[in-house]
Image (cartoon, grey):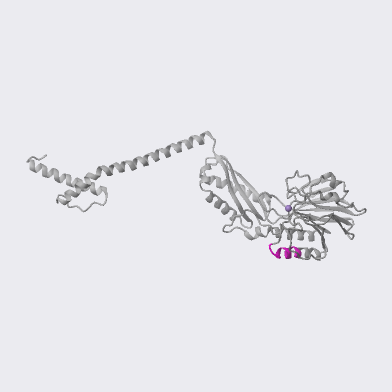
Amino acid sequence: MDELRILHAADLHIDSPMHGLAVYEGAPIDSVRNATRTAFQALVSEAIERKVHLVLIAGDLYDGEWRDYNTGLFVSGQLGQLHEAGIQVVITYGNHDAASSVTKYLRFPPNTKVLSSGHPETHLLSDIGVAVHGQSYPSRSVTENLSLAYPEAREGLINIGMLHTCLDGSLGHDPYAPCKLDELKSKRYDYWALGHVHNRRVVGDDPPIVFPGNLQGRHIRETGPKGATLVTFLDKEPHLEELVLDAVRWEHCKVDVSGAKTFDECLDLCQARLFEVLDTAGAEAFAVRVELSGPTVADGSLRGDIDRLANEVRNMALSRKGTDVWIEKVKTSTSPSKDKKDIEESALVAEVASVLIDLKESVSEISESANQMLAPLRALRSQLRVSGISSREDPTDDSQLLQALEDAAELLIARLGSRNGSNAN
Ligand SMILES: [Mn+2]
């Protein structure tokens, strides 16, 4: 065969829950919930369109035990489409879908081979001249070096090794099926189809040793484009192509609001940055964390109304027509401004605020003492009314009371004047 095309995927985690997504009005719930399935459908379409000969799934096809048989029915249906297109499939299970972890079972269509969890085995595909070597995980925690027992390469065939591994552990994943690059190379295979590390990494060139990364990000630590690796052998020489197949793109949108003066200014910066991230990423659906950072005088007002801030950002996301954008979280990592002018301004604002607070306290003190001063006058007025000197109604507020007292005082002065027989004028 002059040209052999193999599509290598790993870590599909079909029906994995999407972690940490807030539910709110208008959030594109369905596209996010179905993302792992939609991405698998994209993989199958791509395989058919590109007329690949073989699809490899190198572990963690499932996220864990099926909630119900629908997960199995979905996967089997997709494998059936590959079968109809004449495309063969080889699967190894990893730590998430180890034989002991997934107990429900459905038979796959005849194009699909699952490699044994008991020992490394070779699956021969003589019609396309390929030998696939590999082993599934018997249990979640496989700590021995599985690669050591992998079979010898078959002469005259293209040899592919499949392994779900942490390699030497330096890539920071759970330490399963550890091995060294040199041990893989020593097998003299033509390609190593690895899984387990969710970031795409090409860790060897001769032969290619590849982690394709997961097919669909599932949380904020799995950002950026996700997909699979297309390996084309031209006269037995491998050529790699990265295919982006994710249905929902995870992005961490970091907004620098340094120097913004107001809450509104921060919102403007958020919108500009969010839209820039969405435009650049070029996906159709997103799950986005928006994080504001930098020193700003608006630090206090952002932190004081984080709920409004979150909903203003959701509001921006909803205004993007034709793109499903789920705002996973809005985080405030801002700090108070260190700018001298800002500090002076805020010192001035603080001073004015403190004067206003003092003033308010003084007003309540004044009104207290006014009340005390008015108490004997109130008593006097009652006496005046009882003695018929004033006939006004009971006052309802102090101004009426004062008016009544003034009237009474005038009356008394007039009476006193006439009693003494002398008028002021
Ligand atoms: Mn995985």
- Which residue range is magenta in the image? 67-77
Image coords of residue 338 (percent x, y): 54, 35
Image quadrant occupied by the C terminus: top left
Residue shown at the point (55%, 41%) measured from the top left: 260
Q: Is residue 22 above or below residue 334?
A: below
Pick the residue in front: 284 or 15: 15
Relative placement, left or right, of 16 versus 266 is: right
Relative placement, left or right, of 120 versus 336 is: right
Pick the residue in front: 184 or 314: 184
Residue 87 figure quarter: bottom right
Residue shown at the point (37%, 40%) measured from the top left: 359
Q: Is residue 398 magenta?
A: no
Image quadrant occupied by the N terminus: bottom right
Image coords of residue 67 (percent x, y): 68, 62
Residue 318 figure quarter: bottom right
Q: Is residue 73 magenta?
A: yes
